[in-house]
Amino acid sequence: MSLITTLARLEAVRTGRAQPAATVRHRHLSDRPLVFVPLTTAGEAGAPLGALVGTDRDAPHLLVVPQPRDRDLRFAFLADLADIVLPHIEAYAESVEAAERTETDPETGKRVKVEVDLCADAAQLVVPSRAGVDFVRLLGRSMRFRRTAEQDPETPHPAPPRVPLLGRWLTHYGERARVPGSSLLLAMTDLLGRHWATGQSTLEDQHLGALLAWIAPDGTQGATGAEAARRAELARDADGQLLCPPAGPATDPAFDNRLLAPAIERHHRARTALAAAEDGLEADDRLGALTAAEREIRGLVESRTRPTWDAVWRGLDLLRELPEGAHAEERWTRDRWSFTSHRDRILAGEPPQPRRDDAVTAANKLATREREQARLEAQEALDDPLVMAGRRLSGEAFAGEVVDVVMAYSESKRPSPRPLVTVRTDDRPHLGERVKVYRSLGGKPQTAEYVGPAAPDHGDGTGTGADDGTLVLRIMDKMGRGKEPEAGSVPEKGDLVCFTLFEHEQRGGAKLPDPEQTPWTHGGPPGETATVPEAADAQTEEDVL
Amino acid sequence: MTAETLAAPAPAAFDPGAEAARATAAILHDTLHGTERGVVVDSPPGAGKSTLVVRAALELAEAGRPLMVVAQTNAQVDDLVLRLAEKDPDLPVGRLHSSDADPYDKALDALENVRKSAKAADLAGQAVVLSTAAKWAHVKVDEPWRHAIVDEAYQMRSDSLLAVAGLFERALFVGDPGQLDPFATVGSEQWAGLAYDPSSSAVTTLLAHNPGLPQHRLPVSWRLPASAARLVSDAFYPYTPFRSGTDHGDRSLAFAVPSDGSGPDRVIDEAAAAGWGLLELPARHTPRTDPEAVRAVAAVVRRLLDREGRATSERSPDPAPLTAARIAVGTAHRDQAAAVRAALADLGVHDVTVDTANRLQGREYDVTVVLHPLSGRPDATAFHLETGRLCVLASRHRHACVVVCREGVGDLLDDYPSTEPVQLGTLVKFPDGWEANHAVLAHLAEHRVAWRP
């Protein structure tokens, strides 16, 4: 945790309210996000219990699995989910604009520009918490290898037609969520945690109700954030149920034991009774009982998801009040490229994402994410003075006033301008001789080199030596080709400038070999087996109830 | 401690020179005449890794095999070039460098047979071509090199090896398994357990896919004094013990100016006599840049210089003055290093190296002053417990090491046992940071000087 975050948290404790950790919104928010609030069954990994999903805050779709251990009901849930999520995604996938991309021509090996489709916008998925992101990933993994009756008539438990496709999309969203700064799949707790600092630990911030209680307490007038958060976390009604149910996908054990388990048991009995009905009249009666039991479970699931659903939308409202950061759009464009390329892979009939990445894919992903991480950190600081303040406090940037500019030239045959700029700053950057520093000049980084502290007998009499924070920089580039620097390219006396020790833009990494060229050190090429889509796990006895 | 019992009892007559020569001969034999595509050499701190790399490079060049050398940083590459040129000034050496400004050490310009270029094609025909892994990753060749030497292979990440492994047919991998592991700036749990986890070390991946490769070990540390080799070996290399090349009494550190009785002077005398000194400040939770501890570090350095130390070693019969260039300060974090530098500047000390463990890797000094990574902390995170971090900090010195630390680290360790999740399929590293830290603390406790500044 950086010093400025620690300070903000301390201040939040003292004031009883969350403190802003950003002055702009650092993530793109779609006009029509698809909010997904899933619940899972305790003790059954990957067995969904129900979900609220939709784009209309007042009319979410409620999906429920009344008997989570029944494979057919589970499939029915997933098919319903696919019917809501896929049309939403496909609507975005169909609307494209023309864009250019640089590709390597397979014949000449040259880099050429090609015109391709880029989705004009991408579907954004919002879940309440980080555990929700993991659940999306888990659902994706459990669905993408399923076979439909059409794909494989022999398969013992064919999946509904669109379920494997939903699995592939959710897998893509789950994987993209691992890229720093991406906004295809967002967790509300992460979003709010990025923009506000509360007076509790980051672990406690994972509770959406408690987090919102710090940021925007409702109802309970006068309560401090800590009190409101405590209430959100722990307060129970007369029946021992949490007033603010956890954001899931895990449910509260008291709910599981006292409400859900009996209801599922009643449903199970009603179903067994219906199956045993001997005539139509009896069956009608028992169907009524079954429907009532099912309605009860639906009511229970809705009661536990609706508060979270509302909380997610309240979080979205809060975030929308912040203006979007300057670079968020650029990062969203990369999300659109990612969305488009997945769409293209599906259209091209490629197999689902493999269970495990091969060596080259894994290395490429890691390199991309590290680059995006560095890019995100730099862009957030450039977009937001509060974030930059944190970097200045940790010695990674400094801001100050230009007190002197002396023209100088490089010692080469064609001397280029290398003006010396003296900056007075109250910051304490970790500078060493010839360390490079950067400032943003018209959106592009300009490089300067640290020369040293200003000499005590400096021309204007302001410099008094190393300790007063007056330092000399040599501007290195972005001054044009002429002997005299272009107008506006060199800071002038009196200018307020902000330099960073970190680079603003990231270089692309080296190209890795193709997977078929994987070297011997990494096990050699993956071989034929890896190109054939993997079958789902074979059925074991434990799979059958 | 279990490590105590595991360290092999010293044989009656241990001849370090002969042992090291035997190991080197076996390594060179496997490299030049072996049938396997790779040879792995584990080298404890100061065991002559660079010497081995230079010697192997010269022998491979002599055998007429085109050789590429992969190191991790530009400083390491330049250092190897200089050593090669020193051993064989006639050898045609290529230094492949980046196209940035000042890409290599200016000292290389004085060497006649060293050709420098940013393009690999310009260096074709040189007997040995050296560069960093990052630069090699951009090189494309039709004909791979017959042989490669990968230096600091344990500090190289698996994905970095993936990018360059296509450039060579066979390779000698040399490195120190006890130093800091490579790291990624983003989470990489999703690949944990895969043999080719891109965030693991190059050697881990290499051996996972090629378990039959010959593995060698350099058995003697020439840098560490007898007082340190035993502790470092027991604490950090319990299953692959090594010895020091010198014995107790072969080296000594004396000061012309006597002690003034202050804490820094007492700890300096303790370290000069025993090889280790612990300057213990009162227990307290502090920010990372603990001003008292930082000032204590600076004070120790100042007194080391003021007291006109003389270091006697096997290198020469005459004592060498302990100058600022022979002293280093090691910290865990960069802001701590910056704070120490500022404190030293306040005391008028300039040319002493102050850096983090990551940047001190591979360096050697007569005396080191270490700010303990756990000093003053309220918690012990995986970063601060990392075995390699403490190992680097505790193994840079030829004569003595002074550790500055707040009291209570032992309790802190006991309050925070390792809680990292166990990943299936990954090699568990022994010893873990918790155990290694305890082993070092237990030893340092015998050389403790309590001081209230």
Image (cartoon, coloured by chain):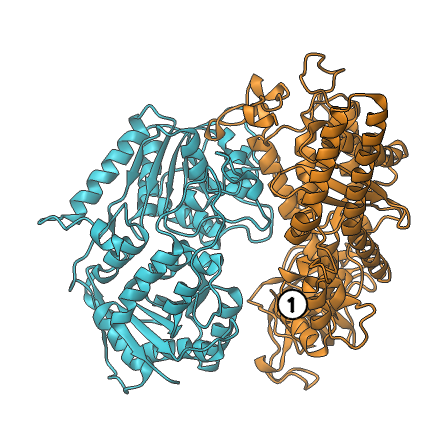
* Left or right, B403 with reference to A503: left
* Quadrant holding the N terminus of chain A: bottom right
Residue B132 image offset from top left, x and y in percent: 50, 44
Q: Position of residue B214 (x, y in %)?
A: 32, 31
Chain B: colour as depicted: cyan
* Relative horizontal placement of residue A404, taking residue B81 as reference (left or right): right
Residue A491 lies, in percent from the top left, at: 77, 69
Colour chain A is painted in = orange
Q: Where, by quadrant of the figure, is residue B262 drawn?
A: bottom left
Callout 1: chain: A
Question: Residue drawn 50% across and 27% down?
Answer: A519
Residue type, numbered disc 1:
Gln
Q: Residue at x 49, y 60 (%)?
A: B381
When asked about the image quadrant of residue A315, the answer is bottom right
Q: Residue furthest top?
A: A154
Q: Report the front residue among B390 and A71.
A: A71
- Say which element carries label 1: loop
Q: How many labels sit on residues?
A: 1
In the rendered image, which residue does mark 1 sit on? A200
Query: Which residue shows up at 73% across the image and 75% down it?
Result: A224
Residue A458 or residue A398, whichever sits in front: A398
Q: Is residue A27 visible?
A: yes
Task: Find the residue positioned furthest to the left.
Answer: B12
Image quarter (top left, top right, bottom left or bottom right) of the C terminus of chain A:
top right
Q: Position of residue B314 (x, y in %)?
A: 19, 60
Examine the rendered structure and indicate whether residue A232 appears above or below residue B159: below
Q: Is residue B425 above or below residue B326?
A: above
